[in-house]
Structure formats: structure tokens, C-alpha cells
Amino acid sequence: MTDSHPGPVSPTTEALGTLRPLPLDAVRLEPGGLLGAWQRRNAAATIPYCVDQMSATGTLENLRRATGQSDRKYAGMWFRDSDIYKTLEAAAWQLAHGDDPGLRDFLDTTASLLAKAQQDDGYLNSYFTVVHPEKRWRELDWSHELYCAGHLVQAAVAAARTDASAELMTVARRFADLIVERFGPDGTDGVCGHPEIETALVELYRATGHRPYLDTARRFLDLRGRGLLGEGRFGAAYHQDHVPVREAEEVAGHAVRQLYLLAGMVDVAVETRDTALLDAAKRLWDSAFRTKTYLTGAHGSRHRDEAYGDPYELPPDRAYAETCASIASFHWSWRMLLATGERRYADEMERVLHNAIAAGIAADGRHFFYSNPLHLRTGHDGSDEDAPSQRLSWYSCPCCPPNLARLMASLHGYLATADDDGLRVHLYGAGILRSPVPDGEAEVTTRTAYPWDGRIELTVTATTARPWTLALRIPGWCGRFTVEVDGTTVAGDAEDGYLRLTRSWDTPTVIVLDLDMPARLVSAHPRVDAVRGCVALTRGPLVYCLEQADLPDGTVLEDVRLDASAPVRAVERADLPDFPVALAAGGTVDRSPSPEPYRDHAAAEDAAEPLPLTAVPYFLWANRTPGPMRVWIPLAATG
Amino acid sequence: MTDSHPGPVSPTTEALGTLRPLPLDAVRLEPGGLLGAWQRRNAAATIPYCVDQMSATGTLENLRRATGQSDRKYAGMWFRDSDIYKTLEAAAWQLAHGDDPGLRDFLDTTASLLAKAQQDDGYLNSYFTVVHPEKRWRELDWSHELYCAGHLVQAAVAAARTDASAELMTVARRFADLIVERFGPDGTDGVCGHPEIETALVELYRATGHRPYLDTARRFLDLRGRGLLGEGRFGAAYHQDHVPVREAEEVAGHAVRQLYLLAGMVDVAVETRDTALLDAAKRLWDSAFRTKTYLTGAHGSRHRDEAYGDPYELPPDRAYAETCASIASFHWSWRMLLATGERRYADEMERVLHNAIAAGIAADGRHFFYSNPLHLRTGHDGSDEDAPSQRLSWYSCPCCPPNLARLMASLHGYLATADDDGLRVHLYGAGILRSPVPDGEAEVTTRTAYPWDGRIELTVTATTARPWTLALRIPGWCGRFTVEVDGTTVAGDAEDGYLRLTRSWDTPTVIVLDLDMPARLVSAHPRVDAVRGCVALTRGPLVYCLEQADLPDGTVLEDVRLDASAPVRAVERADLPDFPVALAAGGTVDRSPSPEPYRDHAAAEDAAEPLPLTAVPYFLWANRTPGPMRVWIPLAATG
């Protein structure tokens, strides 16, 4: 095998950390499995759609305007170039799956256009070239110049790793070199209001070995929290300039900015072996996932400034839960996993991927949610792009669709890692992977209907007889599991969350891991006022929800209760073919609620009649008739 | 007596409606009572402070710039003139309480300045004169030109009714005439993104008898919902342009805009005897107060667009609950009360006044809340003007402080009404009022410690022996009351919410109304997810809250529960002199909550130890050390 195609995040050999990503071309997801189906849909629908949108929305035309080939007015928001870069990155990862003349043409044409639009000194940004040349580098708090540059770099690194384009790397390095010259160790002080450049420069360092990129990334981190960005409309915390990154005690401000910054923190910590910086990231991870994360793995409680709220401020109806924040959270946890080897980071990747991220995209691959609430109320005015009742075909700020495209195209890169002991599998999807192991190479073929079923069959073989360890993640949600080796049940020790099987694998061996996957009733911390007296239904990694489509006509979703004393069963329903596993639960409904908004507590009794309930996977909601939905279901009074 | 000083809203004799406001100079609040104390503080602190701020913040300087007397850059937001007008209105109402050379000087000087800043054609707006003259009338969706004009008119009407200034009326009429010419029945189609001009023009019609003002106001109403304002950033509902006002089924969009518009709707309906329009207002009132109003009487659930949310979307922590919206709600309900005579409107006035409005101003009269949440969380970052932890001395958009000033200065105008049967008292405050009654005049002296105590003693006398009816409001919150006439208990019929005493009052008669005022535990409608499993404590018209200052050190407010089975007692506490009546309740606290954000429902049990609780009136919160506060208190598990 070759490691010429390292994954989306590939720490250098000198880096801190225990786990190593597998090369991207070492993993192939089968189209039948859920992850493989997502990747296939991404290739067939989402990527070509995003490519088309770059023309249809005038986004590429902005670049042409910057080259002088067009005289059209600049279209859209001032950071539109980043949409192009994310689409290019998706195209680059996708080309590693197999050639595609259309995508290659998009990549080559756009790379040439970028080279033409690039200024002589390396600067590249269509908005600031066309609309406000006098403001270049002058308003970093809102300009997104370095943010856009970061996405250019990420696209170039992807294209280099997949041999999809060399020209893109030339363009990106010219711009990166200008950034190093201007803002690097010998440059002026400045940071971008929207992080992204930090993690991008570390990846560029990894791809090129050029140390100034890493040093500049670190500088961008260490200059934060010194007031360079000012208060702005939403305060310094909005762009994480309220406190030095090493001193921060909790995540704050614009969620996507915070999370991209954290990914960059881990990247710099790992490459500079800066354990204090890594400790800061760990502390923030604990804070974020204890007090500011939705059950779906989503982040961001406030629409006003797309921001985190106070601790435990997690309203399901006004969840902002931006799709990009979920993707950023996935990126951050992946880096934490590589650095520490701790299961909880993989658990979090699984949760956010199967719920908050997957919900961002429609079954057709061409409609998207920007915000991902956990409750759409009866009577909701869903006409506003801010909180629409169904996925939209595009947004005035279309950051999420191409972000989904680039993640899905590289998804197979996040399934497993190699380390000195052997191979670890973190995410389960049907497919084949190859991995370096001590003195040889292993191949693992996975057959599973996960997450619909907890049975995972892995056929393992290796080119060496030397023993090595296959470590399989036992998800935190799983209370009981069994494992068989070639038909014989073995005792499994999974104390740290990984079941380890150490042996010689030189003859093909069949492992069957069976994760018990009952439906569960989950409560939130009592400080989460917004869902007090409610439970959510989950099964395996999936969060479920009630949708109006599954209620009898005339039933108001907000008048429905769940009977926690009734059993909840996983069911396959012939009449719901799009939901491989639904949940059947017992409930009640109050068909004549009082009109009074407030009343004496002693008088407050609901009339309830029985109502059987059907819950469907949250990530698949809003693929039928648009209508109310809720994850957190009020409990029926018991007694 | 004279009726030369009609109240803030004075329908003409031709108008629809059953109740008539008393002249402003017919009512005097005693400084000892709560309403009188508020009014006195307003005179001593808030009005002079607002007057000072008009200079300190450069707001008056903007006007000087418009006259050419200054060359300073325009300061602040583009609708700053409205702050001046509201302060002028407050000064005008205040001058009716007694002369004040400082206020008179402010009024005269500013009126002259306005006359100078006014353009030859009558146009008056410092921003559009100084900064964007080319945009005059061109961007009505955001310009606030007519909104500012409306507040000028309101100030002029107040000054005319109190004989405080004639010049202001001259200025206002010149501008109003220009508005009629441009937008009236013979003018072009246009409406303002921020309503206010509608109600103002009706008041101007009432003050002048000039019919085109009324016709133009009606036109502004009827042109809404036709797309004249466009979608803007937040959609057409934001500025109530999504549906014709007569067809609207629920309140929507920016709360202050919606409520000012509704006040204007009632004004136009009443003056044009348009019962269909009044019916629309009634329908919207029912919708608003059933599904979109906080327990404090506040409106507006969303910070993003200062807007109403979906029905029952009433988060206490992210309540926007703008002070101006509460004031607007008070204005709207007053108009509904005059038009219909129904008690519920007076109930609502009482509730919003004693809770949401009163909370907007600090005990010192010089600090203000813009938003009025019902829960300030532990760990809240209160440094942002958007949701500060304590009242601020001013705001970048300082609409609320002078709005409070103008309301408080005219507060006595809202206490009682005259009608063909006699006199009705709606709000209880210590003081004296005179009222026309059939064939004579009545005088009522009220002694009461209301709302701290439910005992109201009224000494009534009249200049005529002809019988008339004294109607006393029995608040909706009151389940039991007694009434004595000259020491003898009489049977009281209050079927429609008013206790009616009909007799000859030619000799002084003492009425003692005793409203039973127990502490109550209140539940919200079960569709209000945000406070499920919680109760609020109320007593009389007052909502109470828990403040951190009353908890033992180290107690996290969010870990406190209320024990609904324990009695709640009204107490006077020597150690809490600023709270005449506090409430003592039983509760528990969980001192070791789980760190896990989510857990199996079956495992979710709180450890609880007993904790006595003290609740204080919501309107007085945040007058001690800033800290967490909550109105809705989670219930302890009963067992």
C-alpha cells in the first residue's frame, strides 16, 4: 500500500499524539452501508449541485470580475470566495474516489481562474480586489480575508494529497507566503475575526514541511485575546478575542469561529508539542460538552449572534445548531482523538455525524439546513431563511452546503487509525480498510447494517504473522456487548472504551461484535430548563424525534406526552420505508387544553387520552410534508 | 373643574367607546403610594437625567448641526431625534404637575431649536437633513422618518394639553401637514417601517379637530400588508407588512412596532367608528395575551429581531421583553379599555405596569433595562448591552429611558374613567381624583398601601345629590373580596369585574374595599415548554422572583427547587427594607448535581436537601449585587 494520500488531518511524525490517520486511499466505504450511502449521495448529488451553484449564484463570476474578464457587479456576501474553496476541496477529495472529468474540469478551470485573479504579491480575494481594494487587511475583525485564505489552503492541501491539482497549491502557497510575510513572526500583529487560517496553515505545514506556516498559525493563536479585534457589534467574545486562548475557561461567542479556532489550537499544540495548549483545548472540550452541547451534538444556542449561550442554555426550539458548527465540532474531536486516543472524542464524532451533521442535508442531497432546531413548533412561521420549516435549496450565506460536501467526500478518512500496537476502528461503516501494522499490512472488511443494527462483522487478515492489536470502539451509549472470534465467544475487556484483540492475523479471521442497541429514554441535566420534564428517545448513536406526519389528523404535537412506563420498541414499518428502524412508544394527548396562558398551580391538570407514538430518526426529519417536530417529549403524569 | 387638560389619549365626543379619560389635572397621586412614588422619582431623577443625556450624548447637537449652528459629526443612530421628542413629551406632562424652570427652559429652548432645524417645507429630521438629504422619504422601511415625526407630534400634543408650549405644536403641525400632503389621501403610497405615526396623527386630530390627520392615519393602516416595505433582513412580518392589518390573525414581528401599530388601529377604529377594525384589534389582543405574553406582561421572545416568537415560545432566560414593548402594551390595553369597558384590559395594564414596566427602571431612577428577562442564569456573561446583568445608565439605542419618563409623568391619567353612569376606578394608587358625574362633580380620596396590601379606602363625595355609580375594579387575580360602606359590609356584585355602588354621594362616604391577596403558585400553559415543571410565585398584581442575594453562599440558583406542598407566606423582613413584602417559601437544593449533561431517564434522580426560600418582587430585582435571578422555579419532586 501507499501512504501518498494522507487523510484530511495528518500530523507529522514529530507531532505529539498517539494515533495516526490512515491514508485516504486505504479505506473504501461500501455504498450499501449508511456512511457509504451518504458518501455516494454526496458524489452523485451534493458535489455536482454545489459546483453548479458556484456558477448559478455568480460566485465564480466574482472571481472573473477580479481578473478583469467580467464587469458584473460583485454578487453576494463578502466572503463568497470561501464557498468556491470548500467546493474545490470537496471536488479534490472526491477525485480520489475515482476520476470524474466534470469535477476535474471544474477544479482545473477554477484553479486557473484563481491564479489569474491572484495579485502580483500573492493576495487573493475577489471582494477586496473588486469592491474595497483600499481596505485590504484593514478590517480584519469582519473582513474574512484570512478565513477565505484558510479555505483556499485547505482546498490546495486536499488537491495535493489526492494529486488532483498542483496549480491550486502554487496559488495557495503564494498567498500563504504573503500572509507569513505580513502577519508571521517578522510581521505585524493581526488576527482574523473568523478563525480558519490557523488550522489551515498547520495543514499546509504538514503538506509542505515549511515551518513558517506553523509558526504563523501559532502566532495567530497567541495574539488572540489581546483586543486586536475590538468589541464589534456583539462584544469581543463573539470572535474569541476576550481572553487569551490558553486562559479560556469555557467556549464562547460565535460557535463556528470558536470551534474552528479550537481545531487550530489542537493542530498547533500537536505539531509544536505544546502540552499546555493541548490542556487548554481539553478543558474547553469538557466545558463545551458538559454544558453547551445539544443531544444531537449540535452547538450554538442563539440566533442573534450565531453564538453559544450561557451554560445549560439549550433551547430546543431556538437551537441555532448551525450545520457548520457541527462539522467543526467533528473536526475538533477528531484532532482530540488523534492527540489522546481517548474514546469519548470518537463517541462525540459518531454522535454529531449521525445526528446534527446528517440532519443538515436532505435525502435528495440538494437541500440543506443551516440551523438545526430540536423542536419545530406548531404554528411556526417557517418562511424566514433564519429558521425555515424545511431544508432550503441554497442560502444567502451558503457556508453549510459545500462544508457538508467536503466532509462527506473525506468521510472514510475518519473511520480508523493506526498506532504502534496495530489498528483501531472508531466509526463503523460497511467497507474495506487497509492499514499498516507492525511488520506488515492488515486488511479489514466490515459488514454491518450499523447504526440500524448493532451487529458488526469484521473479516481481518494481515501480511505478517507478528501479533498486533485490533482495537474496536465500544460506544459510550452501549451498556452490553458480545464478541466472537471465528464463531467462539471471547471475553472482551473494554475498560478504556476499546475492545482489544491481540493475536496473529495471518489467516483470515472473522470477528463478530454485537453491540446491544435498545431504545433508551434520556433525560437532560436538570439545569437545562428548556427540556425539564421531557425525555428524548435514542437508539444506538441515533437520536429520534416525533414528527407531525406520524400523528393522527388534528393532533397538536405540543399536546402529546410520552408515557415513560410503557415499553419502547424498535420496529420496521412497511408503511415507513424511508426509516429502516422506527421506535414505537406509548403516549397520551390532551385534546382540550385550557386556553388560559397562566393558572393556579393547583388547578393545572391535563386531561389525557392514550395515543400510541411513532418516533423516527432525527437526521431524517423534514423529508416528508413539512410540519412540527420535536426531540424532547414531555412526560405524561404518572400515577 | 376644568377639562382643559385632557389625558394622553382623549377620544373625541363622536368616537366609539364607552369610557372617557379624566382630565390629567383631575388626578393627583400621593407620593407615599407606590404609583405616586414612581411618579415622584420620575420627576426628581429620570426626567432631569434624560434631559441631561440629550446634551451629554450629542443628541441635541445633531439638531444644532441641522440648523447650521454646529459642524459636529452626526452622533448615534439615525432615529435619535425621537429620544428628544420623548423627553420633551415627558417634560410637558411633568410641567402639568407644577412649574419647573429647568424643564420649561429645556422645552422652550428645544422647541426653538426644532423650529430652526425645520426645513422650509416643514420637513424635520436631523439625520436626513445632515447625513443623507438625498434619501428623504426614499427608504421608509428603515428610515424611521415617520416614526420620529410621530413622537414629535406626541410631544406637541402633550405640550398643548398641558399648556407647556405652543411653539412645539406649530412645528409639529407644519411637519404633519407636509406628511398629509405627501402621504395623505391625495398623496403617494407609503408606510413607515416603524409604526408610531398612526396613533400620533389620531391624537393630533383629537387635539386640533383637523380631519386630514385622521384620514392619513387610517391610510397608513390600510396600506400595510401590501408589500410597500419589502422583505428586508428579517422578512415582511418584522415590520407588519406581511398581511393587511384587518386580516391578521396573530401578533408578529418586532414587538414594539406591532404594539404601536395596534394602538394606532384602536385609535383609528374608535375615531372612525370602524367596528371591523376594532374587532381585528380584539382578535389580536386575544392571540397576543393567550400565547405570546410573559407572566410579567412583557412581549417579545427573540433577541435576533426584537420580535415575537411562535405561539407559546416564551423562554424566560432569553426573553427579550423590551421595556418599550411593555409600555406600548400598556398604551394598547388602555385604548381597548376605553373602547370596550372590559376589565381584562385594565387587568393587563396593571400587570404590565407593576412588573415588566416597573422592572425597566432602577430604584435610583437613573439606570434602565432594555430587555427584561425572567431568568438570569448562573454563569451569564452580562457584559453585553444586549442582555446585561444589571440596569445600565444608557444604551446605544436609548429608546426605553425617555419612554419610561413620558409614561410615568402621565401615569395618573390612566387610573380612572368617567362614563354616563359615573366613575370607574381601574388602577389603585393613593391620591385624589375629581371626575364629572351626572349633574355634578365627584371627588374621591384613596388611601391604600396597594399593591403591598389589598385594603383600599376611598372617601367619596359629590356636588350633586343625584345618584351615580362608583365602579371599582376587582382584579382578575382576586378570588375573594369584601366591601364596606361607612363601616357596614355590603353585598358586592362584580360579575363583569367591576363592583358597582350606586347611590347619592352628596355626603362624604367611606368605602373600604378589601381584596384578598394571598401568595399564589402559578403554572404556565403546558405548551410553554420553557417553564415546564416550574411554578411562579405571585401576590396580588406582583410577580415575585428568587435572587442570588437571598440564597446561602455557594448555592447555585439553578439547583434550587420549590416545594409546592409547603405554605408560602407574605412576610415583612427587617433585613430587607427595600422589599415591603417578601414571600417565604419552602424549597430544596441539590448540592451535588451530576456533571453528565445527558443520562438514562431511569437514573435521573436529584439529591435534595431542604432550603427555605425568600422571593422578592420581580420589579425590584437587580437593585442589590448583580447576580442570578429567576421567576419560574422548578418544582421539587413530591414523594
Image (cartoon, coloured by chain):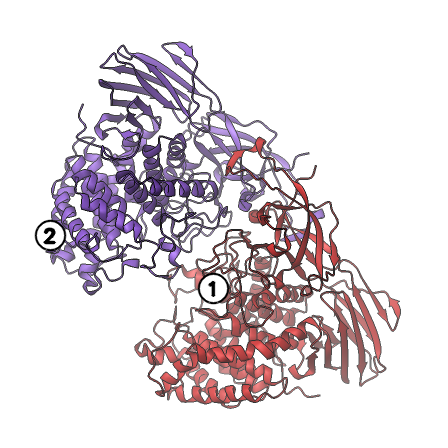
Chain colours: A purple, B red
Amino acid type assigned to the residue bearing label 1 in the image? Pro
Q: Position of residue B2 (x, y in %)?
A: 68, 88
The residue most toward the right is B488
Amino acid type assigned to the residue bearing label 2 in the image? Lys
**Could you say which quadrant of the image residue A106 lies in?**
top left
Marks 1/2 same chain: no
Residue in the image at 68% along x and 54% along y:
B614
The residue closer to the viewer here, B622 or A368, is B622
Q: Chain of mark 1?
A: B
* Callout 2 secondary element: helix
Query: Which quadrant, please, contains the C terminus of chain B?
Result: top right
Q: Chain of mark 2?
A: A
Residue, disc 1: B244
Residue A116 tag number: 2
Residue in the image at 39% along x and 69% along y:
B142
Query: Viewer-nearest of labels 1 and 2?
Result: 2
Q: Position of residue B77 (x, y in %)?
A: 40, 72
Query: Which quadrant, please, contains the N terminus of chain B?
Result: bottom right
The residue closer to the viewer here, A129 or A99, is A129
**Could you say which quadrant of the image residue A367 lies in?**
top left
* Callout 1 secondary element: loop
Q: Position of residue B397 (x, y in %)?
A: 45, 69
Count of picture labels:
2
The residue closer to the viewer here, A7 or B290, is A7
